[in-house]
Amino acid sequence: MNYFVLIGIAIIIVGFIFKLDVVAVVLISGLVTGLIAKMGLVEVLNAIGTGFVNNRYMSLFFISFPVIAIMERYGLKLRAAECIKKIKGASAGMVIWLYIVIRTIASAFSIRLGGHVQFIRPLILPMAEGAARKNIKLTDEDIEKIKGLAGASENYGNFFGQNIFPVASGVLLITGTLKEQGLDISNIDVAKYSILAGVAMVLIALVQCWLFEKHLRKGEKSDV
């Protein structure tokens, strides 16, 4: 085994330690690793290009991190909380349940709307907290519970909604696996039954959010 190819990892570590240009460090590491592995220059460049094309959408995901951080820095969370406070009758449970409905519908049409980093942290969580603080004196434990339910809402909507779309990756995986076991099933069949599961989830989530709100209201300001 040629352990010299690990020099590429050492190059990346040294580059990061000295805060050199990230793209240049990664490219040099890739070139050196390929050449040490006795690959031709054209073959190395082809491998780097193929890897970039296959994973190009990952860069969009990472770009969202600094963008959201800047938005939070300039008051996104504060504005979201202030807006929800102006809505009469808004509650933490209602905000979270509405997001579950929206997230489920979006996933059912394969619309990439949502995400713990992109939506829950900067928008849904501060909106839910803002709605709760209108009438309730929140404790640290209450805030942690709101965070938990807000995070769960993303999982609910995404997990149960995505399989309603007939050509979603999850549907294709389910169909392929069942066909290998000798079951005659189509993508439409999986999507059809996923609708029932999605509707059931939304109704159960409604009950959960109602019970959650009822529990929170034990600490209403008028009682404190």
Image (cartoon, helix red, strand yellow):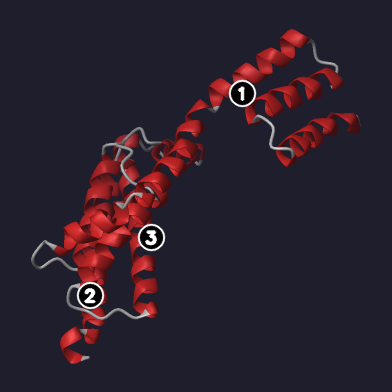
Q: Amino acid at mark 2?
A: Glu
Q: Position of residue 81 (x, y in %)?
A: 24, 60
Q: Is residue 127 left or right of residue 159?
A: left
Q: Residues within 10 Å of mark 1 (few under 14, many from 20)?
A: few
Q: Residue at x 84, y 29 (%)?
A: 5
Residue marked by disc 1: 51
Residue 22 image-quadrant placement: top right
Cα–Cα gap, marks 3 and 1 = 32 Å
Q: Position of residue 191 (x, y in %)?
A: 30, 41
Q: Is residue 29 left or right of residue 188?
A: right
Image height check: is 136 above or below 113?
below
Q: Nearer the viewer, residue 214 or 8?
A: 8
Q: Earlier in the sequence, mark 3 or mark 2?
A: 3
Residue marked by disc 2: 213
Q: Is residue 38 visible?
A: yes
Q: Position of residue 109 (x, y in %)?
A: 26, 37
Q: Amino acid at mark 1?
A: Gly
Mark 1: secondary structure: helix
Cα–Cα gap, marks 2 and 1 = 48 Å
Q: Position of residue 21 (x, y in %)?
A: 65, 29
Q: Is residue 45 left or right of residue 198?
A: right
Image height check: is 119 above or below 216?
above
Decide: marks 2, 1 in contact (CB < 8 A)? Answer: no
Residue marked by disc 3: 151
Q: Amino acid at mark 3?
A: Gly
Cα–Cα gap, marks 3 and 2 = 16 Å
